Amino acid sequence: MKTSLLFLSALSASALARVAYSSLSDDEQADVKQQLTKWKTLYAPLASQHGYVPEAAIESVSVVDSHTDEELARFHNTLQDVAKAQSNKPHAVFSPFNVFALLTQAEFDNMFKNSFAGLNVTATHHVRAVESVDTIASSIDWSTSKCSSSEKNQGDCGDCWAFSAVGTSEFAHCIATGENLDLSEQQVASCDIGSNGCNGGIAPDAIDYVHNNGICLESAYPYVSGTTGQTGSCQMSCAKKTLSIGDTVTTEGEAALVSALNSQPVSVLVEAGNEVWRNYQSGIVTQCPGAQVDHAVIAVGYGTSTHDYYKIKNSWGAQWGESGYIYLQRGVGGKGMCNVVEYISFPTLTGSTVDPPSPSTSKPTASPTTKPPQTSAPTVKPTSLPTATSQPTTSPTSLPTAKPATATNEPTVPPTTTSSETSAPTVKPINKSQKRRWCSVYHKAKRQVCIIWIYQFHLLICTVYVSECCEHMTLD
Protein backbone atom coordinates (compact mmCIF):
# COMPACT_ATOMS: atom_id res chain seq x y z
CA MET A 1 0.00 0.00 0.00
CA LYS A 2 2.85 2.34 0.80
CA THR A 3 4.33 1.64 -2.63
CA SER A 4 0.93 2.42 -4.21
CA LEU A 5 0.77 5.82 -2.57
CA LEU A 6 4.32 6.62 -3.61
CA PHE A 7 3.55 5.54 -7.15
CA LEU A 8 0.44 7.71 -7.41
CA SER A 9 2.32 10.61 -5.88
CA ALA A 10 5.04 10.18 -8.47
CA LEU A 11 2.43 10.31 -11.21
CA SER A 12 1.03 13.57 -9.85
CA ALA A 13 4.49 15.06 -9.47
CA SER A 14 5.32 14.36 -13.09
CA ALA A 15 2.57 16.70 -14.28
CA LEU A 16 0.39 13.68 -15.00
CA ALA A 17 2.16 12.97 -18.28
CA ARG A 18 1.14 9.61 -19.71
CA VAL A 19 3.76 6.97 -18.91
CA ALA A 20 3.86 3.55 -20.58
CA TYR A 21 3.72 0.51 -18.32
CA SER A 22 6.81 -0.93 -19.99
CA SER A 23 8.86 2.09 -18.91
CA LEU A 24 8.15 1.57 -15.20
CA SER A 25 10.75 0.23 -12.80
CA ASP A 26 10.50 -3.35 -11.54
CA ASP A 27 9.04 -2.18 -8.22
CA GLU A 28 6.47 0.01 -9.96
CA GLN A 29 5.44 -2.82 -12.27
CA ALA A 30 5.11 -5.15 -9.28
CA ASP A 31 2.83 -2.61 -7.60
CA VAL A 32 0.59 -2.35 -10.68
CA LYS A 33 0.35 -6.16 -10.80
CA GLN A 34 -0.56 -6.32 -7.12
CA GLN A 35 -3.33 -3.74 -7.54
CA LEU A 36 -4.64 -5.45 -10.68
CA THR A 37 -4.84 -8.76 -8.80
CA LYS A 38 -6.89 -7.03 -6.11
CA TRP A 39 -9.14 -5.44 -8.74
CA LYS A 40 -9.78 -8.79 -10.45
CA THR A 41 -10.75 -10.34 -7.13
CA LEU A 42 -13.18 -7.56 -6.25
CA TYR A 43 -14.58 -6.25 -9.53
CA ALA A 44 -13.80 -8.51 -12.49
CA PRO A 45 -16.96 -10.68 -12.14
CA LEU A 46 -19.23 -7.62 -11.95
CA ALA A 47 -17.42 -5.88 -14.81
CA SER A 48 -17.83 -8.98 -16.97
CA GLN A 49 -21.51 -9.30 -16.07
CA HIS A 50 -22.32 -5.77 -17.19
CA GLY A 51 -20.13 -5.67 -20.29
CA TYR A 52 -17.40 -3.40 -18.95
CA VAL A 53 -14.53 -5.68 -19.99
CA PRO A 54 -12.89 -5.03 -23.38
CA GLU A 55 -12.91 -7.81 -25.93
CA ALA A 56 -9.14 -8.22 -25.61
CA ALA A 57 -9.48 -9.17 -21.94
CA ILE A 58 -12.72 -11.17 -21.87
CA GLU A 59 -10.95 -14.51 -21.35
CA SER A 60 -7.95 -13.39 -19.29
CA VAL A 61 -9.87 -11.22 -16.82
CA SER A 62 -11.15 -14.28 -14.95
CA VAL A 63 -7.58 -15.43 -14.20
CA VAL A 64 -6.88 -13.58 -10.98
CA ASP A 65 -3.18 -14.32 -10.43
CA SER A 66 -1.99 -13.91 -14.02
CA HIS A 67 -2.14 -10.77 -16.16
CA THR A 68 -1.66 -10.12 -19.86
CA ASP A 69 0.34 -7.17 -21.14
CA GLU A 70 -2.94 -5.70 -22.43
CA GLU A 71 -4.53 -5.84 -18.99
CA LEU A 72 -1.49 -4.34 -17.30
CA ALA A 73 -1.27 -1.50 -19.80
CA ARG A 74 -4.97 -0.70 -19.44
CA PHE A 75 -4.97 -0.82 -15.65
CA HIS A 76 -1.82 1.29 -15.50
CA ASN A 77 -3.53 3.91 -17.68
CA THR A 78 -6.47 3.92 -15.27
CA LEU A 79 -4.11 4.54 -12.36
CA GLN A 80 -2.82 7.58 -14.22
CA ASP A 81 -6.38 8.76 -14.91
CA VAL A 82 -7.11 8.48 -11.19
CA ALA A 83 -4.08 10.63 -10.41
CA LYS A 84 -5.26 13.17 -12.97
CA ALA A 85 -8.75 13.28 -11.49
CA GLN A 86 -7.39 13.62 -7.96
CA SER A 87 -5.18 16.59 -8.83
CA ASN A 88 -6.74 19.94 -7.88
CA LYS A 89 -9.77 18.18 -6.39
CA PRO A 90 -8.98 17.90 -2.67
CA HIS A 91 -12.61 17.53 -1.60
CA ALA A 92 -13.26 14.26 -3.45
CA VAL A 93 -11.61 10.84 -3.59
CA PHE A 94 -10.99 8.89 -6.79
CA SER A 95 -10.04 5.23 -7.12
CA PRO A 96 -9.31 2.62 -9.81
CA PHE A 97 -11.38 0.09 -7.89
CA ASN A 98 -14.57 0.17 -9.92
CA VAL A 99 -16.05 -1.79 -12.80
CA PHE A 100 -14.57 0.53 -15.44
CA ALA A 101 -10.88 -0.01 -14.62
CA LEU A 102 -10.00 -2.01 -17.77
CA LEU A 103 -11.67 0.41 -20.16
CA THR A 104 -9.65 3.12 -21.84
CA GLN A 105 -10.96 6.65 -21.38
CA ALA A 106 -11.98 6.66 -25.05
CA GLU A 107 -14.01 3.46 -24.59
CA PHE A 108 -15.66 4.89 -21.50
CA ASP A 109 -16.45 8.15 -23.29
CA ASN A 110 -17.99 6.20 -26.17
CA MET A 111 -20.52 4.69 -23.77
CA PHE A 112 -22.08 8.15 -23.42
CA LYS A 113 -21.35 9.77 -26.77
CA ASN A 114 -24.61 8.57 -28.32
CA SER A 115 -26.85 9.03 -25.27
CA PHE A 116 -28.75 11.86 -26.98
CA ALA A 117 -27.60 11.37 -30.60
CA GLY A 118 -30.11 12.71 -33.13
CA LEU A 119 -32.50 13.80 -30.38
CA ASN A 120 -33.61 17.31 -29.49
CA VAL A 121 -32.41 17.75 -25.91
CA THR A 122 -33.37 21.43 -25.96
CA ALA A 123 -37.05 20.90 -26.81
CA THR A 124 -39.08 23.45 -24.86
CA HIS A 125 -42.65 22.19 -25.17
CA HIS A 126 -42.66 21.23 -21.47
CA VAL A 127 -41.09 24.38 -20.07
CA ARG A 128 -42.88 26.40 -17.43
CA ALA A 129 -41.94 28.26 -14.28
CA VAL A 130 -41.33 26.09 -11.24
CA GLU A 131 -43.89 26.82 -8.55
CA SER A 132 -42.30 28.45 -5.54
CA VAL A 133 -42.42 26.73 -2.16
CA ASP A 134 -43.31 28.42 1.11
CA THR A 135 -40.01 27.60 2.78
CA ILE A 136 -36.68 26.58 1.28
CA ALA A 137 -34.96 23.97 3.44
CA SER A 138 -31.30 24.43 4.27
CA SER A 139 -30.71 20.77 3.44
CA ILE A 140 -32.88 18.07 1.90
CA ASP A 141 -32.42 14.41 0.97
CA TRP A 142 -35.04 12.09 -0.52
CA SER A 143 -32.75 9.06 -0.77
CA THR A 144 -33.46 7.91 2.80
CA SER A 145 -37.25 8.01 2.51
CA LYS A 146 -39.51 5.03 1.96
CA CYS A 147 -39.97 6.33 -1.59
CA SER A 148 -36.35 5.60 -2.49
CA SER A 149 -35.56 2.46 -4.48
CA SER A 150 -32.34 0.47 -4.52
CA GLU A 151 -29.39 1.61 -6.62
CA LYS A 152 -29.67 0.19 -10.15
CA ASN A 153 -27.17 -0.59 -12.91
CA GLN A 154 -27.89 0.20 -16.56
CA GLY A 155 -24.96 -1.98 -17.64
CA ASP A 156 -23.86 -2.12 -21.27
CA CYS A 157 -26.77 -0.10 -22.64
CA GLY A 158 -27.07 3.65 -23.20
CA ASP A 159 -30.50 3.93 -21.58
CA CYS A 160 -29.57 6.15 -18.65
CA TRP A 161 -32.47 8.37 -19.78
CA ALA A 162 -34.92 5.53 -19.04
CA PHE A 163 -33.48 4.96 -15.55
CA SER A 164 -33.64 8.68 -14.81
CA ALA A 165 -37.22 9.04 -16.07
CA VAL A 166 -38.53 5.90 -14.37
CA GLY A 167 -36.77 6.67 -11.08
CA THR A 168 -38.15 10.21 -11.04
CA SER A 169 -41.65 8.87 -11.80
CA GLU A 170 -41.37 6.28 -9.01
CA PHE A 171 -40.52 9.02 -6.53
CA ALA A 172 -43.37 11.27 -7.71
CA HIS A 173 -45.98 8.50 -7.53
CA CYS A 174 -44.82 7.46 -4.07
CA ILE A 175 -44.88 11.05 -2.77
CA ALA A 176 -48.40 11.49 -4.16
CA THR A 177 -49.83 8.17 -2.94
CA GLY A 178 -47.47 6.59 -0.41
CA GLU A 179 -47.10 3.59 -2.76
CA ASN A 180 -43.49 2.63 -3.50
CA LEU A 181 -43.24 0.74 -6.79
CA ASP A 182 -40.29 -0.86 -8.58
CA LEU A 183 -41.08 -0.06 -12.21
CA SER A 184 -39.71 -1.41 -15.48
CA GLU A 185 -36.91 0.51 -17.16
CA GLN A 186 -36.86 -2.21 -19.82
CA GLN A 187 -40.38 -1.34 -20.96
CA VAL A 188 -39.48 2.32 -21.41
CA ALA A 189 -36.22 1.53 -23.22
CA SER A 190 -37.87 -0.99 -25.56
CA CYS A 191 -41.33 0.50 -26.06
CA ASP A 192 -40.95 4.29 -26.12
CA ILE A 193 -41.00 4.87 -29.88
CA GLY A 194 -39.70 8.41 -29.42
CA SER A 195 -36.36 7.09 -28.18
CA ASN A 196 -33.46 5.08 -29.57
CA GLY A 197 -33.31 2.54 -26.76
CA CYS A 198 -29.72 1.64 -25.89
CA ASN A 199 -28.55 4.36 -28.29
CA GLY A 200 -30.13 7.22 -26.39
CA GLY A 201 -33.32 8.95 -25.39
CA ILE A 202 -34.72 12.05 -23.69
CA ALA A 203 -35.80 11.82 -20.04
CA PRO A 204 -38.74 14.31 -20.16
CA ASP A 205 -40.16 12.54 -23.21
CA ALA A 206 -39.82 9.24 -21.36
CA ILE A 207 -41.69 10.70 -18.37
CA ASP A 208 -44.43 11.67 -20.84
CA TYR A 209 -44.47 8.08 -22.10
CA VAL A 210 -44.93 6.72 -18.58
CA HIS A 211 -47.71 9.23 -17.87
CA ASN A 212 -49.60 8.56 -21.11
CA ASN A 213 -49.15 4.79 -21.44
CA GLY A 214 -48.75 3.41 -17.94
CA ILE A 215 -45.87 1.18 -16.93
CA CYS A 216 -45.32 -2.42 -15.85
CA LEU A 217 -43.62 -3.51 -12.66
CA GLU A 218 -39.96 -4.54 -12.83
CA SER A 219 -40.92 -8.06 -11.72
CA ALA A 220 -43.28 -8.40 -14.70
CA TYR A 221 -40.93 -6.86 -17.28
CA PRO A 222 -37.35 -7.32 -15.94
CA TYR A 223 -34.31 -5.47 -17.20
CA VAL A 224 -32.05 -7.42 -19.59
CA SER A 225 -30.48 -4.83 -21.89
CA GLY A 226 -27.67 -4.22 -19.41
CA THR A 227 -26.24 -7.68 -20.08
CA THR A 228 -27.24 -8.12 -23.74
CA GLY A 229 -26.31 -4.62 -24.87
CA GLN A 230 -29.43 -4.66 -27.05
CA THR A 231 -32.63 -2.61 -26.76
CA GLY A 232 -34.86 -5.60 -27.44
CA SER A 233 -38.35 -5.67 -28.93
CA CYS A 234 -41.31 -4.27 -27.04
CA GLN A 235 -43.22 -6.85 -24.98
CA MET A 236 -46.54 -5.55 -23.64
CA SER A 237 -48.12 -8.68 -22.20
CA CYS A 238 -47.71 -7.48 -18.60
CA ALA A 239 -50.32 -5.44 -16.74
CA LYS A 240 -49.54 -1.73 -16.80
CA LYS A 241 -49.85 0.51 -13.78
CA THR A 242 -51.28 4.02 -14.10
CA LEU A 243 -49.25 6.40 -11.95
CA SER A 244 -50.44 9.44 -10.02
CA ILE A 245 -48.34 11.86 -12.03
CA GLY A 246 -49.30 14.71 -14.32
CA ASP A 247 -47.69 16.84 -17.00
CA THR A 248 -43.92 16.98 -17.33
CA VAL A 249 -42.10 20.16 -16.33
CA THR A 250 -38.70 21.17 -17.71
CA THR A 251 -36.66 24.06 -16.36
CA GLU A 252 -33.08 25.15 -15.64
CA GLY A 253 -30.91 26.99 -13.16
CA GLU A 254 -29.65 26.64 -9.58
CA ALA A 255 -32.67 28.31 -7.96
CA ALA A 256 -35.10 26.19 -9.98
CA LEU A 257 -33.36 22.95 -8.99
CA VAL A 258 -33.28 23.83 -5.29
CA SER A 259 -36.94 24.84 -5.38
CA ALA A 260 -37.99 21.66 -7.20
CA LEU A 261 -36.06 19.44 -4.78
CA ASN A 262 -38.12 20.81 -1.92
CA SER A 263 -41.09 19.02 -3.51
CA GLN A 264 -39.59 15.94 -5.16
CA PRO A 265 -36.50 14.38 -6.81
CA VAL A 266 -35.95 15.39 -10.43
CA SER A 267 -34.24 14.18 -13.59
CA VAL A 268 -31.10 16.11 -14.58
CA LEU A 269 -28.53 15.81 -17.36
CA VAL A 270 -24.80 15.93 -16.63
CA GLU A 271 -21.43 15.69 -18.36
CA ALA A 272 -20.17 12.33 -17.06
CA GLY A 273 -17.97 10.92 -19.82
CA ASN A 274 -14.71 11.81 -18.08
CA GLU A 275 -12.16 10.47 -15.59
CA VAL A 276 -13.85 12.33 -12.72
CA TRP A 277 -17.15 10.43 -12.95
CA ARG A 278 -15.50 7.21 -14.07
CA ASN A 279 -13.24 6.95 -11.02
CA TYR A 280 -15.30 8.84 -8.41
CA GLN A 281 -15.39 7.19 -5.00
CA SER A 282 -16.52 9.79 -2.47
CA GLY A 283 -16.59 13.44 -1.43
CA ILE A 284 -17.71 16.56 -3.31
CA VAL A 285 -16.68 17.12 -6.93
CA THR A 286 -15.53 20.73 -7.32
CA GLN A 287 -14.12 20.55 -10.85
CA CYS A 288 -15.59 18.77 -13.86
CA PRO A 289 -13.96 18.53 -17.32
CA GLY A 290 -16.04 18.96 -20.44
CA ALA A 291 -19.08 21.08 -21.25
CA GLN A 292 -21.48 18.77 -23.10
CA VAL A 293 -24.20 16.79 -21.33
CA ASP A 294 -24.08 13.06 -22.06
CA HIS A 295 -25.75 11.29 -19.14
CA ALA A 296 -29.13 11.38 -17.36
CA VAL A 297 -29.34 10.90 -13.57
CA ILE A 298 -31.61 11.83 -10.64
CA ALA A 299 -31.04 14.76 -8.28
CA VAL A 300 -32.30 13.66 -4.85
CA GLY A 301 -31.15 16.44 -2.54
CA TYR A 302 -28.76 19.20 -1.56
CA GLY A 303 -26.94 20.41 1.52
CA THR A 304 -23.77 21.95 2.90
CA SER A 305 -20.52 20.42 4.16
CA THR A 306 -17.06 21.56 3.06
CA HIS A 307 -19.01 23.05 0.13
CA ASP A 308 -22.65 23.45 -0.80
CA TYR A 309 -23.57 20.36 -2.83
CA TYR A 310 -26.20 18.46 -4.80
CA LYS A 311 -26.70 14.76 -4.12
CA ILE A 312 -27.10 12.76 -7.33
CA LYS A 313 -28.33 9.19 -7.80
CA ASN A 314 -26.55 7.43 -10.67
CA SER A 315 -27.41 4.23 -12.54
CA TRP A 316 -24.02 2.49 -12.41
CA GLY A 317 -24.79 0.22 -9.46
CA ALA A 318 -24.24 0.45 -5.71
CA GLN A 319 -20.55 -0.48 -6.06
CA TRP A 320 -19.81 2.82 -7.80
CA GLY A 321 -19.25 6.10 -5.94
CA GLU A 322 -20.81 6.52 -2.51
CA SER A 323 -23.12 3.52 -2.67
CA GLY A 324 -24.36 4.60 -6.09
CA TYR A 325 -24.42 8.36 -5.42
CA ILE A 326 -22.18 11.32 -6.29
CA TYR A 327 -22.01 14.80 -4.76
CA LEU A 328 -21.53 17.84 -7.01
CA GLN A 329 -20.66 21.32 -5.80
CA ARG A 330 -23.71 23.59 -5.66
CA GLY A 331 -23.88 27.30 -6.35
CA VAL A 332 -21.12 27.62 -8.96
CA GLY A 333 -23.40 29.53 -11.33
CA GLY A 334 -24.01 29.12 -15.04
CA LYS A 335 -24.98 25.60 -16.02
CA GLY A 336 -23.78 24.23 -12.70
CA MET A 337 -21.09 21.70 -11.84
CA CYS A 338 -20.94 19.12 -14.65
CA ASN A 339 -23.89 21.01 -16.25
CA VAL A 340 -26.23 19.66 -13.57
CA VAL A 341 -28.69 22.59 -13.70
CA GLU A 342 -28.85 22.94 -17.49
CA TYR A 343 -31.70 20.47 -18.11
CA ILE A 344 -34.11 19.70 -15.26
CA SER A 345 -37.34 17.71 -15.70
CA PHE A 346 -39.94 16.08 -13.48
CA PRO A 347 -43.62 15.10 -13.48
CA THR A 348 -46.19 17.11 -11.57
CA LEU A 349 -47.82 15.38 -8.61
CA THR A 350 -51.50 14.44 -8.78
CA GLY A 351 -53.92 13.03 -6.23
CA SER A 352 -53.77 13.48 -2.48
CA THR A 353 -50.41 13.09 -0.79
CA VAL A 354 -50.18 10.21 1.66
CA ASP A 355 -47.27 10.12 4.13
CA PRO A 356 -44.81 11.90 1.81
CA PRO A 357 -41.14 12.23 2.73
CA SER A 358 -39.80 14.91 5.02
CA PRO A 359 -36.25 15.18 3.64
CA SER A 360 -33.30 14.13 5.78
CA THR A 361 -29.65 14.95 6.12
CA SER A 362 -27.18 12.73 4.27
CA LYS A 363 -23.82 14.20 3.38
CA PRO A 364 -20.94 12.58 1.47
CA THR A 365 -18.04 10.99 3.30
CA ALA A 366 -14.40 10.37 2.49
CA SER A 367 -15.17 6.75 1.66
CA PRO A 368 -18.31 4.84 0.64
CA THR A 369 -20.69 4.50 3.55
CA THR A 370 -23.59 2.26 4.41
CA LYS A 371 -26.90 3.82 3.49
CA PRO A 372 -28.89 4.75 6.61
CA PRO A 373 -31.96 2.66 7.34
CA GLN A 374 -35.08 3.81 5.55
CA THR A 375 -37.72 5.73 7.41
CA SER A 376 -41.25 6.55 6.45
CA ALA A 377 -39.99 9.93 5.26
CA PRO A 378 -36.61 11.65 4.85
CA THR A 379 -36.02 14.53 7.24
CA VAL A 380 -34.94 18.10 6.61
CA LYS A 381 -32.18 19.79 8.52
CA PRO A 382 -32.35 20.97 11.25
CA THR A 383 -34.78 18.16 12.17
CA SER A 384 -32.97 15.64 14.38
CA LEU A 385 -35.01 12.60 13.40
CA PRO A 386 -37.03 11.61 10.28
CA THR A 387 -40.72 12.33 10.68
CA ALA A 388 -43.81 11.49 8.65
CA THR A 389 -45.77 14.61 7.79
CA SER A 390 -48.15 15.69 5.08
CA GLN A 391 -45.43 17.84 3.51
CA PRO A 392 -41.64 17.79 3.66
CA THR A 393 -40.41 19.43 6.86
CA THR A 394 -38.42 22.56 6.15
CA SER A 395 -36.07 24.69 8.12
CA PRO A 396 -37.02 28.36 8.55
CA THR A 397 -34.38 29.70 6.20
CA SER A 398 -35.12 31.60 3.03
CA LEU A 399 -32.17 30.09 1.21
CA PRO A 400 -30.19 26.83 1.64
CA THR A 401 -27.14 28.31 3.29
CA ALA A 402 -25.90 27.64 6.77
CA LYS A 403 -25.04 24.17 7.94
CA PRO A 404 -27.68 23.11 10.52
CA ALA A 405 -26.78 21.86 13.94
CA THR A 406 -27.85 18.28 13.29
CA ALA A 407 -25.84 16.35 10.77
CA THR A 408 -25.55 12.67 9.91
CA ASN A 409 -23.59 10.90 7.19
CA GLU A 410 -22.11 14.19 6.04
CA PRO A 411 -19.24 14.69 3.58
CA THR A 412 -15.81 15.20 5.04
CA VAL A 413 -12.72 16.57 3.40
CA PRO A 414 -10.93 13.45 2.07
CA PRO A 415 -9.13 11.67 3.53
CA THR A 416 -10.01 13.20 6.92
CA THR A 417 -12.88 11.54 8.72
CA THR A 418 -14.91 13.66 11.12
CA SER A 419 -16.70 12.49 14.19
CA SER A 420 -20.47 12.40 14.14
CA GLU A 421 -22.32 15.47 15.33
CA THR A 422 -25.22 15.54 17.75
CA SER A 423 -27.98 18.08 18.17
CA ALA A 424 -26.95 18.95 21.75
CA PRO A 425 -24.05 18.26 24.10
CA THR A 426 -24.41 15.23 26.34
CA VAL A 427 -25.17 16.09 29.97
CA LYS A 428 -24.00 13.69 32.67
CA PRO A 429 -26.88 12.85 35.09
CA ILE A 430 -26.58 13.54 38.82
CA ASN A 431 -26.84 10.59 41.19
CA LYS A 432 -30.22 10.94 42.93
CA SER A 433 -29.07 9.06 46.02
CA GLN A 434 -26.36 11.56 46.65
CA LYS A 435 -27.89 14.33 48.73
CA ARG A 436 -24.77 16.27 49.41
CA ARG A 437 -21.52 16.58 47.62
CA TRP A 438 -18.63 18.92 48.23
CA CYS A 439 -16.19 19.59 45.44
CA SER A 440 -13.55 22.17 44.82
CA VAL A 441 -11.77 23.39 41.76
CA TYR A 442 -8.20 24.50 41.91
CA HIS A 443 -7.91 27.64 39.84
CA LYS A 444 -4.47 27.40 38.26
CA ALA A 445 -4.11 31.06 37.46
CA LYS A 446 -5.14 32.74 40.72
CA ARG A 447 -5.32 29.77 43.12
CA GLN A 448 -8.88 30.69 44.01
CA VAL A 449 -11.32 28.16 45.36
CA CYS A 450 -14.91 27.75 44.24
CA ILE A 451 -17.19 25.71 46.44
CA ILE A 452 -20.29 24.15 44.94
CA TRP A 453 -23.13 22.82 47.05
CA ILE A 454 -25.28 20.20 45.38
CA TYR A 455 -28.56 19.26 47.07
CA GLN A 456 -31.43 17.35 45.40
CA PHE A 457 -30.45 18.56 41.86
CA HIS A 458 -30.29 22.24 42.98
CA LEU A 459 -26.96 24.00 42.51
CA LEU A 460 -26.04 26.89 44.80
CA ILE A 461 -22.80 28.40 43.67
CA CYS A 462 -20.88 29.96 46.50
CA THR A 463 -17.91 32.06 45.49
CA VAL A 464 -15.07 32.51 47.87
CA TYR A 465 -13.19 35.70 47.19
CA VAL A 466 -9.45 35.89 47.44
CA SER A 467 -8.42 38.78 45.20
CA GLU A 468 -11.24 38.36 42.68
CA CYS A 469 -14.05 35.84 42.19
CA CYS A 470 -14.06 32.62 40.19
CA GLU A 471 -16.97 33.08 37.84
CA HIS A 472 -17.36 29.76 36.03
CA MET A 473 -16.94 26.11 36.84
CA THR A 474 -17.74 22.84 35.00
CA LEU A 475 -18.33 19.54 36.74
CA ASP A 476 -17.10 16.41 34.92
Image (spheres, grey):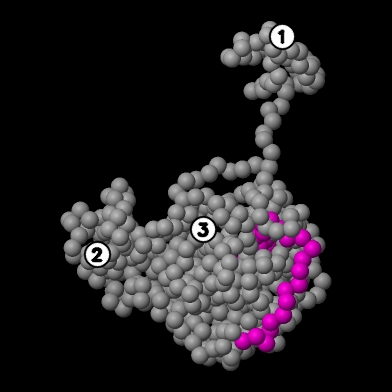
Tell me what residue is drawn at x 17 percent, y 56 percent. 26
Identify residue type, mark 3. Ile
The answer to whether 438 appears left or right of 418 in the picture is: right
Identify residue type, mark 2. Val
Label annotation for residue 274: none
2 and 1 marks in contact (CB < 8 Å): no
Residue 351's place in the image compared with 402, above or below, is: below
Label annotation for residue 284: 3
Q: Which residue is mark 1?
A: 465
Q: Which residues are magenta?
A: 123-152
Q: Could you tell me residue 198's position as x and y percent? A: 49, 84
Name the image quarter holding residue 438: top right
- For residue 124: magenta? yes
Residue lying farthest to the top in this orientation: 466
Circle 1 SS class: loop
Name the image quarter holding residue 106: bottom left
Identify residue type, mark 1. Tyr
**Whole-number angstrom distance, CA of label 3 to CA of label 1:** 54 Å
Q: State which tag comes first along the sequence, 2 or 3.
A: 2
Circle 2 SS class: loop
Q: State which tag comes first along the sequence, 2 or 1.
A: 2
**Whole-number angstrom distance, CA of label 2 to CA of label 1:** 74 Å
Q: Could you tell me residue 35's position as x and y percent? A: 30, 57
The answer to whether 162 appears left or right of 13 in the picture is: right
The answer to whether 60 appears left or right of 290 in the picture is: left
Can the viewer see residue 71 in this picture? yes
Q: Could you tell me residue 206's position as x and y percent? A: 62, 83
The answer to whether 314 appears left or right of 423 in the picture is: left
Tell me what residue is drawn at x 45 percent, y 54 percent. 90
Q: Which residue is mark 2?
A: 19
